[in-house]
Image (spheres, helix red, strand yellow):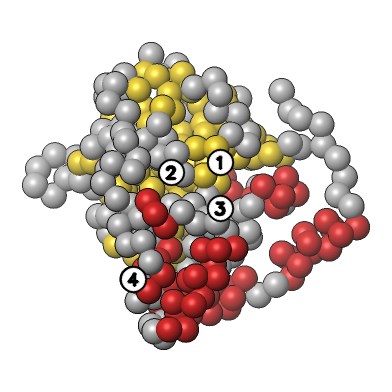
């Protein structure tokens, strides 16, 4: 059921207008360049300020001091200590792919997903008009996870999977914070994204990395950095699912990362999984904890 929609205030409308008017791509390119610079004490000072402002818990990282990182990007995609995120070992349980908060979750009604109160978007637009892929998830289940600046920014597998397809989709670079998700129509289907389809024991699963303003790049463990460069065209990569070149990933293994925060969307076929009942909008998520049960 849709939540009631309230009209934005004057200041909220101003914030929304700024998102439409700001030079998204130049800002993102500049942020990417700055994040790669190795400026010694200056870089360490910036990391220290960022960690303090956003209350980043460096104690759980492999490297615990700002001075341990040569660049801001190295800090931002910092790996965690072993066992900092225990992976649920129940073979019938899928685990959460990322730290963050649930943006929305639930049933896909025919081909429509809930973005936020007052806004729906379609499978077809989200999946770059790949009609065959969209049909696999009609009436299925979804969960959208928002990663804030303070969160761990590597993305992991909810279950064992074999990569079948990757689609790079060029698009806008709106911020994906909860406020904008409530006020920018079709946000996740408009933004740049990387769509990854996996074969699993219960059927197909899609995991989507959604880009955003200042998210300078997204990467996967099999292809490295996807962007930049940024193509103007949709790029489709098909993968063999058997043989030496096949990409097999285990539950809890890393599959990708964001250089600055963004959003992960997971899609599941109809009747195959039951999402954990507490995973409603605003609920905190920790990678490795239960996401759903396989039916």
Label 3 packing within 10 angstroms: few (<14), some (14-19), many (20+): some
| Left or right: residue 234 compared with residue 185 | left
Of the two numbered discs 3 and 1 on the same chain, state the one appearing first in sequence.
1
Looking at the image, which residue is at 27% across and 26% down?
89
Whether residue 210 is visible, yes or no, is no
Secondary element under disc 1, as helix, strand or loop, is strand
Q: Is residue 53 above or below residue 81?
A: below
| Pick the front one: 110 or 173 | 173
Q: Which residue is mark 4?
A: 68
Secondary element under disc 3, as helix, strand or loop, is loop
- How far apart are labels 2 and 4 at the CA level? 24 Å
Q: Which residue is mark 1?
A: 101
Of the two numbered discs 3 and 2 on the same chain, state the one appearing first in sequence.
2
| Left or right: residue 120 compared with residue 263 | right
Q: Nearer the viewer, mark 3 or mark 4?
A: 4
Disc assigned to residue 190: none
Q: Position of residue 200 (x, y in %)?
A: 28, 29
Q: Nearer the viewer, mark 1 or mark 4?
A: 4
- How far apart are labels 1 and 2 at the CA level? 9 Å
Q: Position of residue 226 (x, y in %)?
A: 37, 63
Quadrant position of the N terminus in the picture: top right
Q: Which residue is mark 2?
A: 98
Q: Position of residue 160 (x, y in %)?
A: 26, 33
- How far apart are labels 3 and 1 at the CA level? 8 Å
Disc assigned to residue 148: 3
Looking at the image, which residue is at 43% across and 84% down?
41
- How far apart are labels 1 and 4 at the CA level? 28 Å
| Pick the front one: 252 or 6 | 252
Secondary element under disc 2, as helix, strand or loop, is loop
- How far apart are labels 3 and 4 at the CA level? 22 Å
How many marks overall?
Answer: 4
Q: Are marks 3 and 1 in contact (CB under 8 Å)?
A: yes
């Amino acid at each position: 059921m849709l939540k009631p929609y309230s009209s934005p205030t004057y200041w909220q409308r101003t914030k929304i207008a700024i998102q439409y008017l700001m030079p998204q791509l130049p800002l993102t390119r500049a942020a990417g360049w700055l994040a790669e610079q190795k400026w010694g004490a200056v870089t360490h000072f910036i990391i220290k300020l960022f960690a303090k402002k956003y209350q980043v818990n460096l104690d759980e990282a492999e490297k615990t001091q700002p001075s341990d990182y040569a660049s801001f990007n190295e800090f931002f995609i910092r790996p965690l200590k072993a066992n900092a995120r225990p992976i649920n070992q129940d073979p019938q349980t899928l685990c959460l792919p990322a730290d963050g908060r649930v943006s929305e979750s639930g049933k896909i009604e025919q081909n429509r997903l809930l973005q936020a109160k007052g806004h729906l978007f379609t499978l077809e637009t989200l999946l770059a008009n790949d009609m065959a892929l969209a049909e696999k998830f009609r009436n299925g289940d979804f969960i959208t996870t928002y990663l804030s600046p303070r969160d761990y920014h590597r993305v992991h597998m909810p279950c064992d999977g074999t990569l079948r397809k990757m689609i790079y989709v060029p698009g806008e670079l709106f911020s994906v914070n909860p406020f904008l998700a409530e006020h920018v129509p079709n946000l996740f289907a408009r933004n740049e994204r990387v769509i990854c389809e996996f074969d699993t024991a219960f059927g197909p699963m899609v995991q989507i990395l959604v880009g955003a303003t200042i998210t300078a790049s997204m990467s996967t463990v099999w292809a490295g950095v996807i962007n930049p460069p940024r193509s103007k065209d949709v790029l489709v990569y098909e993968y063999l699912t058997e043989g030496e070149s096949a990409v097999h990933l285990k539950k809890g293994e890393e599959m990708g990362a964001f250089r600055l925060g963004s959003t992960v969307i997971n899609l599941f076929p109809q009747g195959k999984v039951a999402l954990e009942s507490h995973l409603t909008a605003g609920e905190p998520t920790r990678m490795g904890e239960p996401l759903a049960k396989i039916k």
